Image: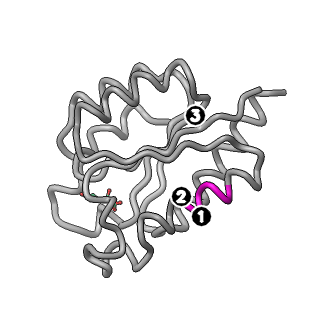
Amino acid sequence: MNNKIIIINGPNLNLLGEREQSQYGSITFNQLKENCLKKGKEMGLDVEFFQSNIEGELVNIIQNARETFDGMIINAAGFTHTSVSIRDALDLFKKPIIELHLSNIYKREDFRHKSLISGVVTGGIFGLGAEGYILAIISLHKTLQNENR
Ligand code: DQA
């Protein structure tokens, strides 16, 4: 059965609800997590929701996910724009990956316009706020269902 997905969140996303509400909305990290787990359950997916502020921890989680998970949604947050190591780890995950950003990174400062991970993911969603996570879950569900056929 192809139904295990992991949602990985990078630095500072634990402070959603508190940080820059104009960019990220008022949803808290716990509310976001609950919404994602609820949507996953509804769709028959086994969802793990993870957050870390530490680059190496994110690399470890992505490496270990190769064995356990069928798909991944990742908001690498600030590391999107800086981390070759996270990109390299993602490149080793040979299953569907959706890159996610709450904000529209192309409407913001120049340094956010470059994503080091876009070149190794299946597709991406940005600028749709917390709803983007739900859309990513629906999309991954569809992809995994097609793989199960
Ligand atoms: C973000 C965008 C990044 O540029 C930023 O560093 C974040 C969050 C987003 O979800 O919009 O922390 O990934």
Give whichever of discs 3 and 2 has the lower sequence position.
Answer: 3
Q: Relative to residue 81, is residue 52 drawn left or right?
A: right
Residue 50 % position (x, y): 43, 45
Residue type of the residue flagged with mark 2: Tyr
Residue 124 or 137: which is nearer the viewer?
137
User: How many numbered circles does the render carry?
Assistant: 3
Residue 128 in the image: state x and y as whole percent: 48, 68
Disc on res. 35: 1
Check disc 3 and report the residue beneath it. 71
Q: CA distance from mark 1 to mark 3?
A: 18 Å
Q: Is residue 88 left or right of residue 111?
A: right
Residue visible at 50% across and 37% down? 97
Residue segment shown in magenta: 34-39
Query: Residue 34 versus residue 145: which sits nearer the camera?
Result: 34
Q: Nearer the viewer, residue 142 or 31?
A: 31
Q: Nearer the viewer, mark 2 or mark 1?
A: 1
Give neighbour class at mark 1: few <14, some 14-19, many 20+ (Cα, 10 Å): some
Principal secondary structure, stretch drawn in magenta: helix
**On screen, 47 above or below 128?**
above
Residue designated by label 2? 133
Q: Are marks 1 and 3 in contact (CB under 8 Å)?
A: no
- The disc placed on residue 50 is none
